[in-house]
Image (cartoon, rainbow, N blue to C red):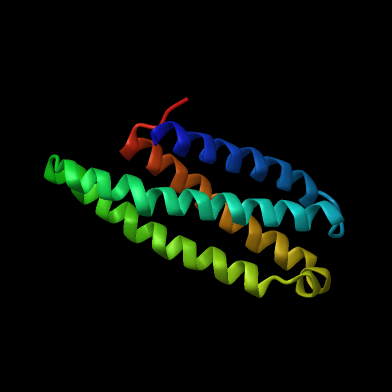
């Protein structure tokens, strides 16, 4: 399961890098919408793996109180970030992206920055390292 988590994390990080290249354009391009779709799918898979498998396994194993606290915090943060991602997707439709490309890029940069930070915390807690 940890290997699956790392694979999803790495695919998401690679896709973020790919998407950042798209942001360099002065206007949105067709690749953006496919990248957004792929990013949403990967994010959903990662969220589901954490929620359905890794958190419950860690709770069943018990462990020291510090680690359990880290996992509880990670779970709470994950739910907040998942909602933020859903809101971002629903707010930034193709039409609103076209209407406010600079605003979209700024919002997307903020979201991907938080995703990167989140992945680092996941790797620290679950020891999912390359």
Residue at figure coordinates x 68%, y 41% from the top left: 17
Up-down: is 43 above or below 18?
A: below
Residue 98 shown left or right of residue 12 in the figure: right
Q: In which quarter of the image is the N terminus?
A: top left
- Residue 108 falls in which quadrant of the image? bottom right
- Residue 67 falls in which quadrant of the image? top left
Residue at figure coordinates x 61%, y 56% from the top left: 40
**In this orientation, which residue lies closer to the viewer: 107 or 54?**
54
Residue at figure coordinates x 42%, y 28% from the top left: 129
Q: Where is residue 66 in the image (x, y as percent from the top left)?
A: 16, 44
Q: Position of residue 7 (x, y in %)?
A: 52, 34
Up-down: is 122 above or below 26?
A: above
Residue 31 shown left or right of residue 85 in the figure: right
Up-down: is 102 above or below 7?
A: below
Q: Where is residue 103 in the image (x, y as percent from the top left)?
A: 72, 67
Residue 70 shown left or right of residue 11 in the figure: left
Q: Position of residue 117 (x, y in %)?
A: 47, 46
């Amino acid at each position: 399961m940890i290997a699956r988590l790392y694979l999803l994390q790495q695919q998401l990080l690679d896709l973020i890098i790919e998407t950042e290249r798209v942001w360099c354009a002065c206007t949105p391009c067709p690749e953006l919408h496919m990248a957004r779709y792929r990013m949403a799918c990967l994010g959903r898979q990662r969220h589901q793996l954490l929620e359905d498998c890794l958190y419950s396994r860690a709770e069943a194993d018990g462990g020291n109180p510090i680690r359990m606290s880290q996992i509880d915090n990670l779970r709470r943060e994950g739910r907040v970030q998942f909602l933020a991602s859903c809101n971002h997707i629903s707010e930034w439709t193709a039409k609103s992206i076209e209407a406010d490309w600079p605003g979209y890029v700024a919002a997307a940069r903020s979201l991907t920055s938080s995703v990167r930070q989140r992945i680092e915390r996941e790797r620290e807690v679950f020891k999912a390292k390359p």
